[in-house]
Amino acid sequence: MRSKLQCRKLKNMPARDRQFWEKHPGVVWSNPDAPDSVMISNALLQGKRDVLKAAAEHFGIAMLFDEWNKIVTAAREFPEIERVVRISGRKIGAYLRSLSAHAQA
C-alpha cells in the first residue's frame, strides 16, 4: 500500500507527453510514467541525437539546455554522471548549441 506522501508525489509528478515518447521508445524503459524532463535527461546522457533533435523541436531548445545544466550540476555529486559529462560533455554541449543555432536560423 502506498503512503499518502507517495500518492501526493505521484499526483504532483509533471505530465509526460506520451504521444511524443511513443515515437522514441527506449529512452526510459523502466518507468513508463517518467516525466518529460527525465526522458530528456536520459536522451542527453545516452547521446541520442535523433531524439534530442525531435525534443528540441517539440519542447523547445531551452528545455534541453535546462536539463543539461541540471546534469552538469548533478555530476559534482554522482561519479557515474560525472563520467558521462567528462567523456561526452563537449560533444553534447556542441550539439545543443548547433540545435540552438539551427532553430534561430
Image (cartoon, helix red, strand yellow):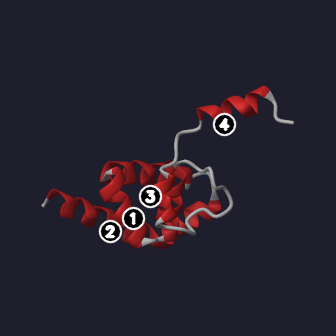
Question: What residue appears at the point 34 percent right and 66 percent down from the top-left corner?
Answer: 53
Question: Mark 4 vs mark 2: which is more N-terminal?
Answer: 4
> What is the x, y in percent for residue 1?
87, 36
How far apart, in angstroms, are the residues tagged by discs 4 and 2?
A: 33 Å
Residue under pointer 1: 52
Q: Residue shown at 54%/61% (left/top)?
A: 42
In this picture, is 15 found above or below 94?
above
Specify the farthest residue to the top: 4
Please report whichever mark, 3 or 4, sits nearer to the chain's N-terminal start. Answer: 4
Q: CA distance from mark 3 to mark 4?
A: 21 Å
Amino acid type assigned to the residue bearing label 2 in the image: Tyr
- Checking the image for residue 5, the label placed there is none
Q: Kindly state the secondary structure of the residue where label 2 is placed.
A: helix
Residue placed under numbered mark 2 in the picture = 95
Q: Which residue is mark 3?
A: 20
Q: Nearer the viewer, mark 2 or mark 1?
A: 1
User: Which mark is in front, 1 or 3?
Assistant: 3
Asked if residue 83 is positioned above or below residue 31 in the image, the reply reads below
Tell me residue 97's x, y (percent): 27, 62
Q: Regarding mark 1 in the picture, which secondary structure is present there?
A: helix
As measured in the structure, the alpha-carbon distance from the residue carrying label 3 to the one carrying label 2 is 21 Å
State yes or no: discs 2 and 1 in contact (Cβ < 8 Å).
Answer: yes
Element under disc 4: helix
Within 10 Å of disc 4 (Cα), the crowding (few <14, some 14-19, many 20+) is few
Query: Would residue 65 be found to the left or right of residue 105 on screen?
Result: right
* C-alpha gap between disc 2 and disc 1: 9 Å
Please state which of the two labelled residues, at mark 4 or mark 1, is closer to the viewer: 4
Q: Alpha-carbon neighbours of circle 2 within 10 Å: few (<14), some, or many (≥20)?
A: some
Please identify the quarter of the rendering in which residue 26 is found: bottom right
Asked which quadrant contains residue 78, the reply is: bottom right
Residue at 53% of width from left, 39% of height from top? 14
Tell me the element at label 3: helix
